[in-house]
């Protein structure tokens, strides 16, 4: 029995070197297999997304972008399936994201700045012609009745039309004219076609507004009219009161006889200067920049906003830095008690979201029921946000509240990095505390803090959230064409030109953006060159 127990509890014999080597190879092979499967799965997801993008681009005839997507997808697959492209596997994601979200954005913004892109000039000339013709359609008297079926593909509606004369089926959309197709027929009516989904009667009713907006061109010639339907069952031929002459490149209003020609401004214009809208996007060169600097209704607000932007950014950096530095010096006093508690309280403004703090301050500064007027000033009616000068002061106060904790943390860390021997050496030389700070500590502090001050200036130069949430740029300037106000900075001005008001001018806004980029880049380059003098202190 004892022999049996010893046999059961005996350890397995040690592995030979060949067995251990085989086990390591098996473990490594299984690990490589798992990573290979994970890599294949991730690349399959990327390829599936790229394939979908290629299909959509193909349907919209975007050949250049399609070729670019295909080339990048092939390159990514080659990099990650190659055993030699080790650096590329780490660099590829970052480079692709850099190109997509930084370089492309900069290039496209610069391109838009040299065009008339904006309200009424959003698409191509062919799209503008089709839109003009479609917007002036009237039903043809004694038009034949067409059996129609509403179909859909990728959220785009189309019409499957049955010709009453020969029973042939054709398909078209708002942008594609009718073309013959092989359709499924029921009772002499085309009801379905491959690749498209036929909408039920209930679906047609729920999307009646979209169905009524359908105007399928009858042919490639826009003067031939379009098929429209009201109920999704029967369609009729509509023709436009505008007639386009491709040879002369003119648009004629058949009701008035007025002729509109393409004069190169991106719209059909009559001899009297009247334009047909929408127009189309064209290259205008430096017109947007010239208009920004010479048009009195734009130049005046632009100069005022630019001056305030520099004042706002400079005062914001100076006030937050000096308050943060003062508090950091106070907290360096070894005799101060409860430092941790005070630090937490001072950092709280920095911990809360800036946009939320700005909204709270906007409520506190309300002239009628704000906390500041009602409680602190005993019901006074002080226009903190509606008076031009008080609104600017309010913006600076709120930005000081939001920004000093960051400067406090930076200065406190920088001061702690200065050796105590420096202070002792100054005392030995007979310097007082102010002289030690001004001649020794401050220069050493600026070596560390100056790059952060430059970055803070650039941030406040484009501090959109504070302006938008606190004052929305108001109070507004009087008698100007742009919807800007006394507290607007350049970035909020760009936003309003591009995205607010009835006429949105993306080209002009992009021109402003380029000017902002040049200004900030120039200031940053000059400032960083000046900081080299401070580095000599080290």
Image (tube, grey):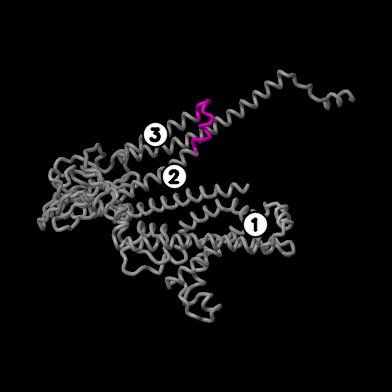
Q: Quadrant of residue 180?
A: top left
Q: Relative to 128, is 96 on the left or the right?
A: right
- Furthest residue toward front: 429
Position of the N terminus, as image quadrant, is top right
Q: Main secondary structure of the magenta part?
A: helix
Instruction: Compare marks 1 and 3 and give the one earlier in the sequence.
Output: 3
- Which of the labelled discs sits on residue 120, or is there none? none
**Percent coordinates x, y for residue 77 in the rendering:** 46, 31
Contact between labelled residues 2 and 1, with CB atoms less than 8 Å apart: no
Q: Position of residue 92 (x, y in %)?
A: 49, 35
Residue drawn 81% across and 25% down?
11
Residue 87 inside the magenta-drawn segment: yes
Q: Residue 458, position in %: x, y?
A: 48, 54
Residue 13: image x %, image y %? 79, 21
- Disc 2: CA contacts within 10 A as few (<14), some (14-19) or many (>=20): few
How far apart in space, not on screen, are marks 2 and 3 (Cα)? 21 Å
Closest to the observer, 360 or 337? 337
Side of 399 relative to 112 (left or right): right
The first of marks 2 and 3 along the sequence is: 3
Which range of residues does the magenta coloring cover? 80-93
Disc 3 packing (10 Å; few <14; some 14–19; many ≥20):
some
Q: Height in image: 403 above or below 365?
A: above
- What label does residue 412 carry, if any? 1
The residue that label 2 is drawn on is: 102
């Amino acid at each position: 029995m004892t022999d049996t127990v010893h046999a059961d509890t005996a350890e397995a014999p040690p592995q030979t070197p060949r067995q251990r080597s085989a086990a390591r190879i098996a473990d490594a092979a299984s690990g490589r297999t798992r990573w290979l499967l994970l890599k294949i799965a991730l690349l399959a997801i990327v390829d599936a997304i790229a394939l979908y993008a290629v299909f959509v681009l193909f349907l919209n005839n975007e050949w250049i972008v399609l070729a670019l997507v295909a080339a990048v997808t092939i390159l990514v697959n080659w990099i990650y399936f190659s055993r030699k492209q080790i650096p590329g596997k780490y660099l590829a994601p970052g480079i692709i994201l850099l190109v997509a979200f930084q370089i492309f954005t900069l290039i496209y913004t610069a391109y838009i700045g040299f065009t008339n892109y904006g309200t009424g000039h959003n698409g191509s000339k062919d799209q503008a012609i089709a839109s003009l013709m479609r917007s002036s359609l009237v039903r043809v008297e004694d038009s034949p009745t067409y059996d129609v079926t509403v179909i859909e593909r990728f959220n785009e509606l189309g019409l499957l039309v049955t010709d009453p004369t020969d029973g042939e089926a054709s398909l078209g959309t708002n942008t594609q004219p009718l073309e013959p197709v092989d359709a499924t027929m029921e009772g002499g009516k085309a009801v379905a076609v491959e690749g498209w989904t036929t909408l039920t009667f209930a679906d047609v009713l729920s999307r009646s507004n979209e169905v009524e907006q359908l105007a399928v061109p009858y042919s490639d010639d826009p003067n031939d009219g379009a098929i429209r339907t009201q109920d999704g069952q029967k369609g009729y031929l509509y023709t436009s009161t505008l007639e386009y002459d491709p040879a002369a490149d003119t648009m004629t209003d058949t009701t008035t006889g007025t002729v509109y020609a393409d004069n190169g401004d991106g719209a059909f214009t009559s001899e009297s200067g009247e334009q047909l809208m929408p127009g189309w996007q064209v290259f205008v060169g430096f017109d947007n920049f010239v208009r920004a600097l010479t048009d009195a209704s734009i130049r005046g607000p632009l100069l005022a906003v630019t001056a305030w932007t520099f004042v706002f950014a400079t005062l914001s950096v100076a006030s937050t830095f000096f308050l943060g530095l003062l508090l950091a010096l106070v907290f360096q006093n070894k005799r101060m008690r409860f430092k941790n508690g005070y630090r937490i309280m001072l950092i709280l403004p920095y911990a809360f979201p800036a946009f939320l703090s700005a909204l709270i301050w906007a409520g506190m500064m309300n002239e009628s029921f704000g906390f500041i007027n009602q409680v602190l000033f005993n019901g006074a009616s002080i226009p903190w946000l509606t008076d031009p000068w008080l609104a600017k002061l309010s913006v600076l106060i709120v930005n000081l509240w939001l920004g000093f904790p960051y400067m406090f943390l930076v200065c406190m860390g920088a001061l702690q990095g200065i050796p105590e021997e420096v202070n002792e050496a100054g005392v030995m030389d007979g310097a007082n505390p102010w002289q030690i700070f001004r001649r020794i500590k401050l220069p050493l502090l600026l070596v560390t803090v100056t790059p952060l001050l430059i970055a803070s200036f650039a941030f406040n130069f484009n501090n959109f959230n504070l302006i938008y949430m606190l004052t929305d740029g108001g109070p507004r300037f009087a008698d100007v064409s742009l919807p800007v106000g006394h507290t607007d900075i350049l970035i909020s001005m760009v936003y309003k030109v591009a995205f607010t008001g009835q006429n949105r001018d993306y080209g002009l806004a992009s021109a402003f953006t380029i000017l902002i980029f040049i200004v900030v880049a120039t200031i940053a380059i000059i400032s960083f060159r000046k900081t080299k003098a401070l580095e000599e202190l080290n």
